[in-house]
Every structure is written in structure tokens, then in C-alpha cells.
Image: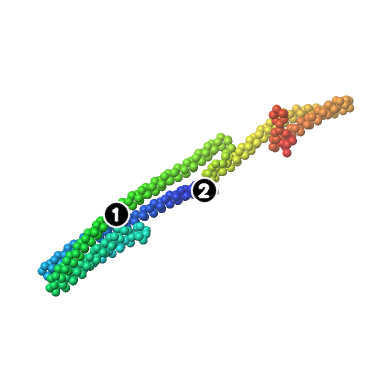
């Protein structure tokens, strides 16, 4: 299958583009870090809200103490209003935890709730929200009992409120501790993900660098090697060596160029042979002209004298003399035919003349 240089370069750059795409995909995973950062931010907000809840609860405790000691109605109202704010903030914290659970499921790509988040939600729901609800309900009951002037029952309800208060504070402490642990876990997770992404990014960049350098070296060496070989062949052709071998070149534009070099060398070889042939014919023509000139002149004299002798001694010569004169005329005619054949040579055909390797031109074949 033929791949030209442009196709090879395209395929190489396509691989580099794919590696870049992989790198982009890896970098896109940094979005998970953004989600983790959002979770961490939400958890810090939860922690701040828990601190505010704790502060509001202290305000509630003061209002309750004032109401218990002097029965100030404004204190009871302040307790109720503060309790509503605490309940609202607890609901807000629960909503934040649900949001965190959703973000965590996106990051982890599964539907399993993180055990730490699950415990945090349970602790907030059971230890804080229920304790707060029980605390506010007992205080409402305390208001009713206190207005009835039943001291024993008032003390009992007051003790129950103290227990609810202690449970609420304990729940807040436990939840605070869980939030701190979750923050530490998230910070650790961010560090691990950053390390993994950094290592993977370095590995991909290293792979891209190695591939790019290797690809560039292979392509450049393949092209330069073929071009050097073509240069050497061109030098040989210039020196008259037309035996060019087109094999071993890549099947691309350089291979096409090698085929063109082969055709050129073949045509030049044929042209050289034709030129040599023409030069040989020209040389033979010059020799023939010289030979004809040098042979025909004395040959005409010999033939003319032989004819004169034949006519003058027609009646008085012996048969042997006549035969010898006739032989002279025949041989001169034979020599004349040879010179005519030399003059008419078109394509010299050389054959072995002796067993020792001497050669001669076959005049009959050379004039066909």
C-alpha cells in the first residue's frame, strides 16, 4: 500500500492530536477538583452555621435562665424567636448536606453515600435537630407548668430541659468533630487527586515529547537517506554509469522520483548506445570513403588494362592466358562489389572471424 509523505505526516500529526485530546480529557478531570472544592466550601459554611447555632443556643439559654429567675415575658418570647432561627439554620445545614451528597455522588460516579457524610447527616438529624425540637417543646411545656404554680412539676420539666440542653450541646460537639474530619478528608483527597493528575499529565507530556521527537527523527532520516542515495545515483549517472537500481525506495514521492531516475537512466543509456552507433557508422563511412578512394582508383586501372589485354589478344592468345585475364576481371569486379557493400553499410553486424576471438563485419548482413 502506497503512503505518500503528506499521508505519513498527517498520520503522525493525527496521533499527536489524539494525545493532545487525551491530555485535554485528563485536564477536564480537574472539574472534579472544583466539585471537591465546592464540597469543602459547603462544609466550611456548615461549620460556620453550627457555630452560629451554638451562639444562638447560648442566647436561648440566657433567655430561659432570665425567664426562670424573674419570669420576664420578653425573655420567653426571645427564647421562642431564637429557637425558630436555630431550627431554620439546622434545616439549612441539612439542605447543605444533601447538596454535598449529590456533588459527592457525581465525583465518585456511584450511588453510594460517603459513610462520613451519612454519619454527619444522621448526627445532625438525630443529635441536633431532634434535641433542638425536644428542647423547644419542653420549654413550651415549662411555660404552661410555670403559670400553674406547681413547683414540683416545674422542677421536673426544668430538669428535662437541662437534659435536652445537654444533649443538644453534645450533638453540636459531635457534629463539629465530624465536620472537621470531613474537611481533613476532603483536603487529603484534593492533594491525592492533584498528585495523580500531575503524574498523569507529566506522563502524557513525556509520551507526546518522545513520540514527536521519534516521529520527526524517523521521517527526517528516511527522507534524507533516500535523498542521499538519489544524489549518489545522480552522480553516477553524470559519470556515465546508467545502471540505476530503483528498488529499496519508499513507496511515496521519493519512490516516484526514483522511478523517474530509472526511466531517465534507461533513456540516457539508449541515447548513448544510439550515439555510439552513429559515431561508429560515421567512422565506418569515413573509412569506407577512404578505402573506396584508395582501392577503386588502382582497381579501375587494373580492370581497364585487363579489358584492353582481352581485346588485343583475342585471336592470338592461348586459352590459359585468356582464362587468367578473365580471372583478373572477375576478381576486380568482386572487389568492386565489396567496396559498394562497404558504402551501403546501414547497421554493422560484427561476427567472430577466428577461434582466437578476432572479429569482422558481415557485409551481407550489415547492408540488409
Identify residue for label 1: 185
Q: Residue shown at 85%/27% (left/top)?
A: 322
Q: Residue shown at 18%/67% (left/top)?
A: 160
Identify residue for label 2: 3
Viewer-closest of 26 and 296: 26
Q: Residue reaching furthest right?
A: 315
Above-or-below relation of 111 to 341: below
Q: Residue shown at 12%/67% (left/top)?
A: 66
How many other residues sit within 10 Å of disc 2, few (<14), some (14-19) or many (≥20)? few
Q: Is residue 308 visible?
A: no
Q: Are marks 2 and 1 in contact (CB under 8 Å)?
A: no
Q: CA distance from mark 2 to mark 1?
A: 55 Å
Q: Residue 99, image x and y in percent?
A: 30, 62
Q: Residue shown at 43%/52% (left/top)?
A: 18
Q: Is the image coloured rainbow, by chain, by secondary structure, or in one colour?
A: rainbow
As drawn, is 14 to the left or to the right of 162?
Answer: right
Q: Which structural element holds mark 1?
A: helix
How many other residues sit within 10 Å of disc 1, few (<14), some (14-19) or many (≥20)? some
As drawn, is 322 to the left or to the right of 361?
Answer: right
Amino acid at each position: 500500500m502506497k503512503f505518500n509523505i503528506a499521508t505519513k505526516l498527517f498520520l503522525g500529526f493525527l496521533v499527536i492530536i489524539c494525545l493532545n485530546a487525551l491530555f485535554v480529557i485528563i485536564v477536564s478531570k480537574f472539574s472534579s477538583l472544583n466539585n471537591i472544592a465546592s464540597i469543602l466550601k459547603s462544609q466550611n459554611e456548615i461549620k460556620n452555621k453550627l457555630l452560629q447555632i451554638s451562639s444562638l443556643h447560648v442566647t436561648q439559654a440566657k433567655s430561659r435562665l432570665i425567664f426562670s429567675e424573674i419570669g420576664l415575658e420578653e425573655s420567653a418570647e426571645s427564647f421562642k424567636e431564637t429557637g425558630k432561627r436555630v431550627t431554620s439554620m439546622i434545616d439549612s445545614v441539612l439542605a447543605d448536606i444533601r447538596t454535598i451528597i449529590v456533588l459527592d455522588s457525581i465525583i465518585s460516579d456511584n450511588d453510594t453515600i460517603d459513610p462520613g457524610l451519612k454519619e454527619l447527616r444522621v448526627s445532625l438529624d438525630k443529635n441536633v435537630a431532634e434535641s433542638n425540637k425536644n428542647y423547644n417543646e419542653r420549654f413550651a411545656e415549662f411555660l404552661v407548668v410555670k403559670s400553674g404554680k406547681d413547683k414540683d412539676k416545674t422542677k421536673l420539666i426544668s430538669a428535662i430541659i437541662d437534659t435536652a440542653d445537654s444533649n443538644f450541646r453534645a450533638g453540636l460537639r459531635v457534629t463539629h468533630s465530624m465536620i472537621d474530619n470531613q474537611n481533613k478528608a476532603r483536603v487529603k483527597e484534593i492533594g491525592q487527586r492533584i498528585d495523580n493528575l500531575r503524574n498523569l499529565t507529566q506522563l502524557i507530556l513525556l509520551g507526546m515529547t518522545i513520540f514527536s521527537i521519534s516521529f520527526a527523527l524517523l521521517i527526517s532520516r528516511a527522507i534524507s537517506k533516500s535523498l542521499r542515495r538519489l544524489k549518489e545515483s545522480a552522480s553516477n549517472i553524470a559519470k556515465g554509469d546508467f545502471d540505476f537500481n530503483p528498488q529499496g525506495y519508499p513507496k511515496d514521492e521519493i519512490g516516484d522520483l526514483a522511478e523517474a531516475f530509472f526511466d531517465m537512466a534507461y533513456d540516457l543509456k539508449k541515447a548513448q548506445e544510439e550515439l555510439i552507433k552513429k559515431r561508429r557508422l560515421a567512422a565506418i563511412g569515413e573509412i569506407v570513403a577512404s578505402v573506396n578512394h584508395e582501392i577503386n582508383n588502382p582497381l579501375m586501372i587494373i580492370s581497364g588494362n585487363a579489358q584492353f589485354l582481352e581485346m588485343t589478344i583475342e585471336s592470338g592468345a592461348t586459352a590459359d592466358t585468356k582464362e587468367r585475364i578473365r580471372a583478373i576481371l572477375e576478381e576486380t569486379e568482386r572487389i568492386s562489389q565489396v567496396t559498394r557493400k562497404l558504402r551501403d553499410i546501414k547497421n554493422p553486424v560484427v561476427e567472430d572471424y577466428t577461434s582466437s576471438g578476432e572479429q569482422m563485419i558481415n557485409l551481407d548482413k550489415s547492408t540488409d
